[in-house]
Image (cartoon, rainbow, N blue to C red):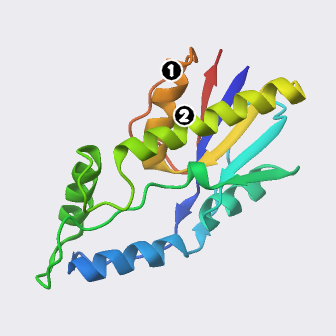
């Protein structure tokens, strides 16, 4: 069985260098609803039996661009929401808000909409669902279009289940990462 992970195409959305916590949250909403910049994706001449994607528009657009058959959307493989660690009207660099929020997620801090435990459960539940569907449908090659931060958790769960593939910490937009079992 092969699973191909693809991070959605690059998002065409600008951000300010400095922002308040409210502006950071507004940035996320804008990012989630922005268009993408398409690129060619090398699918390694594999005939993909099924394609699953996050229900965020950037993943759906990417999936439709690279896969011509039915695409199954799932909220289990959405990007992990990102929230400011604290509220502030003081403008801080974007990278501060982003890094502190991901650290908060890692430590299951209450400032985050989704805790690490929930993200791990989403990955587990999605792969449980996927393995059941694969048995029912005798699918061998599954394409999954998802998001960069979530992909790391999904890769860890795949490895726990015996899949082999290179662990990618910073996946590139519109690239295929292959896992085999």
Determine if residue 42 is in view.
no
Kindly identify which residue carries mark 1.
159
Q: Are marks 2 and 1 in contact (CB under 8 Å)?
A: no
Question: Mark 2 vs mark 1: which is more N-terminal?
Answer: 2
> Going 63% across and 33% down the picture, which residue do you hit?
127
Q: Disc 2 versus disc 1: distance between alpha carbons?
A: 12 Å
Characterize the local packing of mark 2: few (<14), some (14-19) or many (20 or more) Cα atoms within 10 angstroms: some
Kindly identify which residue carries mark 2.
124
> Going 44% across and 27% down the picture, which residue do you hit?
167
Q: Quadrant of the C terminus?
A: top right
- Horizontal side of 88 relative to 47 (left or right) equals left
* Residue 91 picture location, percent across and down: 14, 80
Task: Name above or below for residue 13 compared with residue 169.
Answer: below
- Horizontal side of 59 relative to 92 (left or right) equals right
Characterize the local packing of mark 1: few (<14), some (14-19) or many (20 or more) Cα atoms within 10 angstroms: some
> Going 89% across and 29% down the picture, which residue do you hit?
137
> Going 73% across and 19% down the picture, which residue do you hit?
1
- Residue 46: quadrant of the picture: top right
């Amino acid at each position: 069985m092969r699973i191909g992970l693809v991070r959605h195409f690059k998002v065409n959305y600008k951000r300010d260098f400095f922002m308040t916590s409210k502006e950071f949250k507004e940035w996320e909403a804008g990012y989630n609803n922005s268009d993408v910049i398409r690129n060619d994706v090398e699918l390694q001449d594999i005939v993909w039996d099924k394609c699953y994607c996050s229900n965020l528009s950037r993943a759906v657009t990417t999936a439709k661009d690279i896969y011509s058959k039915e695409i199954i959307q799932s909220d289990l493989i959405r990007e992990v929401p990102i929230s400011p660690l604290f509220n502030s009207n003081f403008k801080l660099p974007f990278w501060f808000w982003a890094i502190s929020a991901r650290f908060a997620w890692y430590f299951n801090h209450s400032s985050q909409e989704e805790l690490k435990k929930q993200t791990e459960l989403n990955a587990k539940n999605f792969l449980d669902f996927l393995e059941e569907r694969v048995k029912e449908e005798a699918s061998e090659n599954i394409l999954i279009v998802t998001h960069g931060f979530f992909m790391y958790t999904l890769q860890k769960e795949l490895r726990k289940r015996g899949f082999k593939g290179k662990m990618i910490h910073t996946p590139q937009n519109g690239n295929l990462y292959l896992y085999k079992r």
